[in-house]
Amino acid sequence: MPTPVPADRAVCSLRNVSRSFGPVKALSDVSFDIRQGEFLALIGENGAGKSTAMGVLFGLVDPDTGHVEVGGTPRRFASARDAIDAGFGMVHQHFKLYPELTVIENVLVGNEGGGPLARIPFRAAEARLRDIIKTYDFRLDLQATVADLSVGEKQRVEILKLLFRDAQVIFLDEPTAVLTPQECLSLFDMLRRLQKEGASIVLISHKLDEVIANAERILVMRRGALVAERAAEATDRAELAGLMVGAQIEAPAKVNAATDRTVLSIRDLTVAGPSGKPRVDAVSFDVAEGEIFGIAGVSGNGQKALVDALMGLETPTGGTVLFRGEEITGKSVAERRAAGIGYMSEDRMSVGLAAQGSITENTTAGREHSAAFSRRGWLRKRAMTRHAERLIETFDIRTPSAQLHVGKLSGGNQQKVVVAREVSAQPRLLLVENPCWGVDVGAMATIHGQLLDLAKSGCAIVLVSSDLEELFALSDRVGVIYEGAIGRIFPRDALDTFAIGAAMAGGGHIGDKHA
Ligand SMILES: Nc1ncnc2c1ncn2[C@@H]1O[C@H](COP(=O)(O)OP(=O)(O)OP(=O)(O)O)[C@@H](O)[C@H]1O
């Protein structure tokens, strides 16, 4: 059980921590405290060193110089369990839950390995969990199977796990990326209650509005260094963006580029699901040349299966897909790519990128044999490198060289590699899933600008995103997908956060299925 410390003392601190990875200085002489009972935010552009700083705190990354202090004394956690036992907990972007187990089983399973609560009897554990659920208004059923829960509920299970283990310092890495606006409000409500009880909350987020609205103190990192500290009430979005990037950021302006020529036309597209319930349920819409058609929805409502069916990665069980007037319903991925359909997967490491490949290899993948990169069967390595270097420049990919393995880039910079590759292929139709997942405000402006330019050049874009701000900034129309069906399609001038949020939670008006 962690010993409570007085409010004016730091629960933990980084002291003069530096860490390099080869030529990259991921942290240089970083020192900061996390105080008891505070709501702290850590922001910074991609590759600024936020994850490395957290890794050092949790004992996952060894500093070259400097150290971590807990409660005023130097300490190095030997493992994540060691950190948990000392009252530190992390809610990751990708949940670590067993879908086939119940909520209570998920909480207890992770506890078997040891720790102060390892031998607590089941009944006592259950009583303790009910208590936590009641105190913090968690709205969770302990007996529910995790696979049946919404994304917001799954996140609450992760937080419940931490509270059960008495976490006093809770780190959240981009926690709202997958939530509806309503779920975001209830998450922050709960975090503020925890804070009132004395817990320290540390939020890592690229969403500056949510940082300002919820944190008290904001630390800004840039290129491995801590460059500024601000009280949330004394700053604004523009100042923070400027501090992060070192320059003002202009969001690109949306222009209406849609023509009346249909590029993609889908009718009653259906993909069967394992339990008989379709994952995609009779979806129909058209996308015109130059149009960006947004798809909003809480993740897990069929958007992935829909995009997979459009790309040829899933076989539809009903309906048709027409691309530029030609039916492509049964065509392979390769045939679709050759016809000019591009695909930017949200799962960048397993589908989008080869981690062991260099940036050059990744940005030319699939096009090695094109005239630009090969001559009489020989690869034109210099041309490939030049192409990669142009993309590194245009998309501001932070890397020491084009030869670096993609697996060594920060998360946001990996995402920029995927975007650069797909946009530079100049597709006629681009299927995109969460293109800005984990990227900073500057990179987001770059990626948005590239997508808008692509639409201006005539490309039709289907944009699946869990970020409503992004959908509103880019889309000509937004369809809301819920349980596999697109219930309502909002034109650009009728986009409304709460109406779309309600439709995402299943409360939309069903009826006008066809656009
Ligand atoms: N294992 C590693 N090997 C090589 N370079 C690394 C490694 N881990 C991190 N880096 C580099 O250290 C720098 C800081 O990365 P870090 O992941 O801490 O950034 P971040 O602020 O968390 O970024 P993001 O917002 O993109 O997640 C980046 O340039 C990254 O490429």
Image: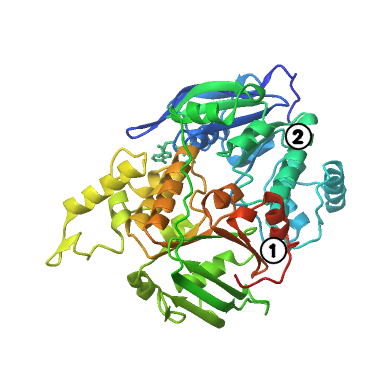
Determine which residue is flagged by label 2: 192
Instruction: Return the x and y of residue 2 as percentages of the image width and height.
Output: 73, 30
- Residue 423: give its label: none
Identify which residue, 128 or 508, lies in the foreground. 508
Residue extending farthest to the left is 376
Q: In this view, does 227 lie to the left or right of 158?
A: left
Q: Which corner quadrant of the figure contains ligand 1?
A: top left
Q: Write the residue at 69% across / 48% down.
A: 181
**In which image quadrant can residue 369 be found?**
bottom left
Q: Write the residue at 86% across / 48% down.
A: 130
Q: Give SS at disc 2.
A: helix
Which color scheme does this rendered protein use? rainbow
Identify which residue, 90 or 205, lies in the foreground. 205
Q: Is mark 1 within 8 Å of ligand 1?
A: no
Instruction: Return the x and y of residue 366 as percentages of the image width and height.
Output: 30, 64
Q: Quadrant of the C terminus?
A: bottom right
Q: Write the residue at 64% across / 25% down.
A: 232
Q: Between marks 2 and 1, how big is the CA–CA gap?
A: 28 Å
Q: Is residue 223 above or below residue 73?
A: below
Instruction: Return the x and y of residue 7 as percentages of the image width and height.
Output: 74, 19
Q: How many labels does the image show?
A: 2
The kind of residue on which mark 1 rests is Ala
> Which is more N-terminal, label 1 or label 2?
1
Q: In which quarter of the image is the N terminus?
A: top right
Determine which residue is flagged by label 1: 147
* Crowding at mark 2 (Cα within 10 Å: few <14, some 14-19, many 20+): many
The kind of residue on which mark 2 rests is Arg
Q: In this view, does 360 lie above or below 5?
A: below
User: Does residue 111 appear in the picture of this structure?
Assistant: no
* Crowding at mark 1 (Cα within 10 Å: few <14, some 14-19, many 20+): some
User: Does residue 213 appear in the picture of this structure?
Assistant: yes
